[in-house]
Image (cartoon, rainbow, N blue to C red):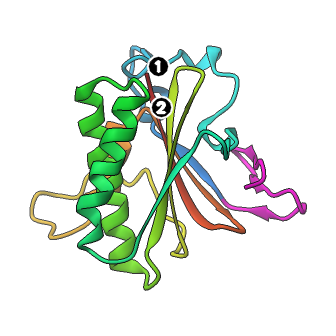
């Protein structure tokens, strides 16, 4: 996968020069926390060199698993848990990552017909996970639905449990990239 360039105000600039919409959500400053502390184990905004969306996927370091049907989600959760533990993510955070990926994969299976794939890798004391599918771009930042709502909590949960979330649209399809600090 090519390295994407991101302008938070203008969208995603692909290597071919095309501009596609994108979002980055999930940092403590995006959430409006008054004390501006970083997410657990995270960097302060001024210390960030690249956003999660600007991080290239290192093919030699990334593990990948495809999923097609609902019965694949159990194996996908085991794949994510084992990979995150092996890369040094603390067990409590592994559970949060596994929940986030499970929610994203379920979203894929509900809204697409082709399934998707998950890529997992770690670099610079950060764990990254891409959930890739051919579905529409997800919209983050809407907040948690009301208690009587039947659906719509999955993306809000992902946003709450991850240090950073980005949505990218490119030649591979729609990518939801999440980051957790190790």
Q: Is residue 157 visible?
A: no
Q: Position of residue 162 (x, y in %)?
A: 39, 37
Q: Is residue 109 above or below residue 80?
A: below
Q: Position of residue 128 (x, y in %)?
A: 51, 39
Is 3 contained in the magenta span? yes
Occupied quadrant, residue 66: bottom left
Q: Earlier in the sequence, mark 2 or mark 1?
A: 2
Occupied quadrant, residue 49: top right
Is most of the magenta stretch helix, strand or loop? loop
Q: Is residue 8 above or below residue 73?
A: above
Tag 2 near tag 1, CB within 8 Å: yes
Q: Which residue is mark 2?
A: 27
Q: Which residue is mark 1?
A: 42
Q: Secondary structure at mark 2?
A: loop
Quick one: 134 or 157, which is closer to the camera?
Answer: 134
Q: Position of residue 63 (x, y in %)?
A: 51, 48
Is 101 contained in the magenta span? no
Question: Residue at coordinates 67% horizontally, 38% vertically from top-left?
Answer: 55
Range of the magenta residues? Answer: 1-21
Quick one: 87 or 35, which is closer to the camera?
Answer: 87
Q: Residue furthest bottom?
A: 113
Q: Secondary structure at mark 1?
A: loop
Occupied quadrant, residue 96: top left
Q: Is residue 89 visible?
A: yes
Question: Residue at coordinates 53% horizontally, 74% vertically from top-left?
Answer: 136
Q: Position of residue 99 (x, y in %)?
A: 26, 48
Disc 2 crowd, CA 10 A, few/some/many (<14, 14-19, 20+): many
Query: Which label sits on residue 144?
Result: none
Is residue 44 shown left or right of residue 11?
A: left
């Amino acid at each position: 996968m090519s390295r994407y360039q991101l302008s938070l105000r203008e969208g995603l600039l692909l290597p071919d020069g095309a501009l596609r919409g994108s979002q980055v959500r999930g940092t403590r400053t995006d959430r409006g926390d008054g004390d501006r502390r970083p997410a657990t184990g995270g960097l302060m905004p001024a210390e960030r060199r690249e956003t999660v969306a600007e991080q290239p996927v290192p093919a030699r370091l990334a593990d990948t698993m495809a999923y097609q049907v609902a019965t694949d989600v159990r194996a996908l959760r085991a794949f994510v848990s084992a990979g995150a533990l092996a890369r040094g993510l603390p067990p409590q955070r592994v559970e949060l990552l596994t929940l986030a990926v499970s929610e994203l994969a379920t979203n894929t299976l509900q809204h697409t017909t082709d399934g998707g794939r998950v890529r997992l890798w770690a670099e610079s004391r950060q764990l990254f996970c891409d959930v890739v599918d051919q579905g529409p771009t997800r919209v983050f930042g809407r907040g948690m639905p009301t208690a009587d709502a039947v659906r719509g909590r999955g993306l809000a949960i992902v946003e709450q449990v991850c240090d950073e979330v980005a949505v990218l649209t490119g030649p591979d399809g729609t990518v939801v990239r999440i980051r957790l600090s190790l």
